[in-house]
Amino acid sequence: MFTLALTKIDLLNLAYLAAAVLFIFGLKMLGKVPTAARGNRVSAAGMLLATVATFFYLTGATAVSLLWIVPALGLGAAIGLVMAQRVEMTAMPQMVALLNGFGGIASLLVATGDYANRRGAFVAIDQLGVDSGGSPGFTLGAIALAALIGGATFTGSLVAFGKLQGVAWVPDQPVQLPGQRWIVFGLLAAALLLTAVFVAWPGAWGVLLLVTLLALGLGVLLVIGIGGADMPVVIALLNSYSGVAAAMAGFVLNNYALIITGSLVGSSGLILTNIMCKAMNRSLMNVLFGGMGAAPAAGGSGAGGSGGATVSGTAREASGADAAIVLEAARQVVVVPGYGMAVAQAQHAVKELVGELARRGIHVVYAIHPVAGRMPGHMNVLLAEAGVDYDTLLDLEPSNVQLRQSDVALVIGANDVTNPAARHDTTSPLYGMPILDVDEARTVFVIKRSLNPGFAGIQNELYFHERTRMLFGDAKKVVMELVNELEQI
Amino acid sequence: MMDLWSCLFSPPLTLGFSTGLPDPFVIGVVVFVLAVFIGFELIAKVPSTLHTPLMSGSNAISGITVVGALLTSFAGSPSFGVVLGFLGIVFATINVVGGYVVTDRMLRMFKEKKDNARR
């Protein structure tokens, strides 16, 4: 890397430029349904180009180095392939979170590895970065920042994975420490201070270690205080972080492939996070630090529904037969899918039910709330798997228009996105979030396993409304029961 | 003016004068900022139905770190830095391969659905 001829570097960077162009085209194509599948392949071609070009640039390396590199690539590819092919569609969100975390720790390892290399080569520490024409201060700063962002992304992603996967030792509900906001800010300030120290005393590897440890802790703290409906935002944000971490690693190595690509991912992830926050009508700060327990007006803490007005009343239960009769007589039905449908893998049953209804001339649409499920577009992916026509999947505004004219709203495993408290209860953590106006329909059927509060820990007052009927049970079983009942009518 | 002329057409006597090439870090910052703007423009108008594949796809792209890991793991002899680089390659490659395959799986469903809808 230090001694190879200049022309090789030129060619390498031109290859990186070509790869970046492919990534840009790929991302653009990923944004439109007809070109999305091809877009992914275009971007994969870019990745292949960048990797192969780097590999050939290194050829001329001793056999020892190649002995390490090829097995490493093979091992990573094999693990990635197996993981990706075996994961269930419903586990997609946590898979993306996990993969994202791996990207984060890779940046951390690259930065600290490069630092270790330079020390090992006994390059005078204050000459760091000078060989590539840069100045040591920036390179050192980049090393520390890459370690900080990469480390935080890693642990944060692991916690997100744990929460979604339901791993035993990761609390499902948000964990709120007193003054959590200040703890996080404090740790962040400390890490940045240590970065400055590191730039001033580059030989002090202990400082870098400390920054890394702080980063790992920050990642955990940041994500553990968030629960429920906010998970999509967290995943989008972590996605962005891992891009920034890659860009930082690029500054360490003066590598333009990393800088360009990392920045692309960083900014696109941030846009997506912003879209999610807007959909929930909350600021990012509120999502990260407000938690589900600290409501805007009240100062409630913890989960378990201590925020918001007390919700009580009687929930009216109905049987599958009753529901089928009402459905059969309807002219328009809106299906509201949620995480419950994902967990029960009920999307195929739902398609069957909708087919039955459509056969009787009933107009059926799906109301897809932007944060339904555990990931943006989660419901869309599931319903796509079931072969549902995507013209029937409506966004928030069109859904609410349809709901006002509908005879039946069929809520399948969706909870917080249908809670009317978001409209009027200023003490509720959901206050202000745009919801699906399910209660505008003439009759509401809610398919749920029990009356237990959902992921957010808040009871849904919708369940106690006059026109709401509960259908208790596993989503798939209940929907299939509805299909059977309908067939008999 | 005369000085400028002679500066342009005489060999540079002092380092970094007439060539005017900035610190690579500054070049990096320029590239960074431009790339950020491109990213904003690319993602601004995406239908919500594609949000999950998009997140997965861009996550795969963030595995570009593998390039950095390759460079870091290259050294004459195994050392601590090389070991870190090795681990970096493994993790980054999992990110890349896993990410692309997962995204492809999701997108294949959209294609099939489109074909079904047309029938």
Image (tube, coloured by chain):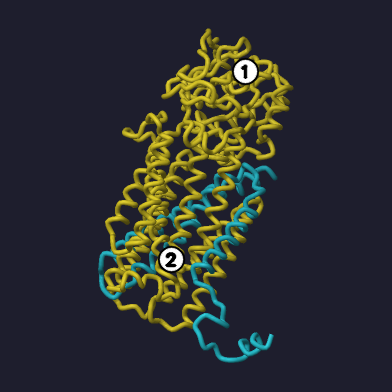
Chain colours: A yellow, B cyan
Left or right, A168 with reference to A95: left
Amino acid at the residue labelled 2: Val
- Residue at the bottom extreme of this rendering: B10
Q: Which chain carries label 1?
A: A
Could you say whether the residue bearing mark 2 is in a helix, strand or loop?
Answer: helix
Left or right, A262 with reference to A353: left
The disc at residue A164 is none
Q: Residues within 10 Å of mark 2 (few under 14, many from 20)?
A: many
The disc at residue B67 is 2
Task: Residue at 68%, 35% (x, y): give it.
Answer: A392
Q: Marks 2 and 1: which is nearer the front?
A: 2
Disc 1 marks which residue?
A444
- Residue at the top extreme of this rendering: A314
Percent x, y of residue A242: 46, 52
Separation (CA) of disc 2 from disc 1:
54 Å
The answer, for residue A288, to whether it is visible in the render is yes
Q: How crowded is mark 1: few (under 14 residues within 10 Å), some or many (20 or more)?
A: many
